[in-house]
Amino acid sequence: MPNEILLAILIVSGIGLIIGVVLAIASVVLAVPTNEKIDAITSELPGANCGGCGFSGCEAYAKAIVAGEAEVNLCPVGGKEVAVKLGGIMGVEAGEVEQKVAVVRCMGSKDNTERRFYYQGSHNCTSATNLVGNLSSCVYGCMGLGDCMKVCPYGAIEVCNGVARIISENCRGCGMCANACPKGLIALVPVKEQALVRCQNFHKGAMTRKDCNVGCIGCMKCVKVCEEGAVEVQNFHALVDPKKCTACGKCVVACPRGCITPFII
């Protein structure tokens, strides 16, 4: 009996040894060679995997750069500093990096809108939107349940009085919050002095007045005072083109609803 047990142990050990050798050889033969430039670029990227560059993650972006399919200045989190490093690796100029920051295009707080009901479901904006549409009188407004806050890796978002708010000094412009918002209320804008329309209500003026105390009613007053042609009204609400806006403040003063605000970093 002891000899049979010993034999079984030897057989199992031998099989294990053979399998180990085969796997070791296979790992060498089938190994995929790595690209040193991809590794070097990936190591310089912030590792946020936020998708702000337009790719699925930092490694995917690094592969696209090496393949000549992407510029080195697309990482919003790394900014100019990272772009210069990537340019050095690739032997190209970094180019200009447009720094952006997130803004919430809604001011429909509990003071400015009416709560439709007391919600006891999943504390999740997407789920609540699919279930009830909205918690406030404005169907286009912020749900205030913090999906954007939960995905932000930089602590740049907080929910105050029922509406998400961006802490600009913490924001890196990665865009994860914009992707998480089921209402499309968060946008990335260039870091510059400009006017911002803090409303995404697409109802006609009369209905918007009922929805929210500060909702845009598409009255055109902002369009009329803008000398740069930076403001237009589409689908009953105003839009400001940051490329044309000179931050003169005339539209801010003209807005009877107070939903156009100055944005200064």
Image (cartoon, grey):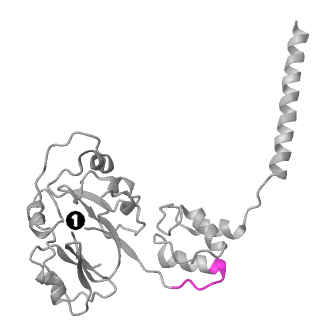
> Which residue is found at the position 77% from the left and 60% from the top?
33
> Which residue is found at the position 36% from the left and 63% from the top?
178
Mark 1 lies on a secondary structure that is loop
Instruction: Identify the image quadrant of residue 15.
Output: top right
Q: Nearer the viewer, residue 236 or 30?
A: 236
The number of numbered discs placed on residues in the rendered structure image is: 1
Vertical arrangement, residue 195 with respect to residue 135, above or below? below
Q: Residues within 10 Å of mark 1 (few under 14, many from 20)?
A: many
> Which residue is found at the position 24% from the left and 58% from the top?
142
Residue at the extreme bottom:
227
Q: Position of residue 134 (x, y in %)?
A: 21, 52
Q: Position of residue 239 (x, y in %)?
A: 25, 77
Indicate the amino acid at tag 1: Cys
> Which residue is found at the position 39% from the left and 60% from the top?
179
The range drawn in magenta is: 88-95
In this rendering, would 45 be left or right of 23?
A: left
Vertical arrangement, residue 249 with respect to residue 112, above or below? below
**Is residue 40 within the magenta segment?**
no
Look at mark 1 in the image and give the residue it sits on. Answer: 106
In this rendering, would 53 be left or right of 205?
A: right
Q: Nearer the viewer, residue 212 or 78?
A: 212
Quadrant where the N terminus lies?
A: top right
Vertical arrangement, residue 164 with respect to residue 21, above or below? below
Q: Position of residue 63 (x, y in %)?
A: 64, 67
In this rendering, would 31 be left or right of 75?
A: right
Vertical arrangement, residue 112 with respect to residue 253, above or below? above
Quadrant where the C terminus lies?
A: bottom left
Residue at the extreme top:
1
Q: Main secondary structure of the magenta part?
A: loop
Q: Position of residue 104 (x, y in %)?
A: 27, 66
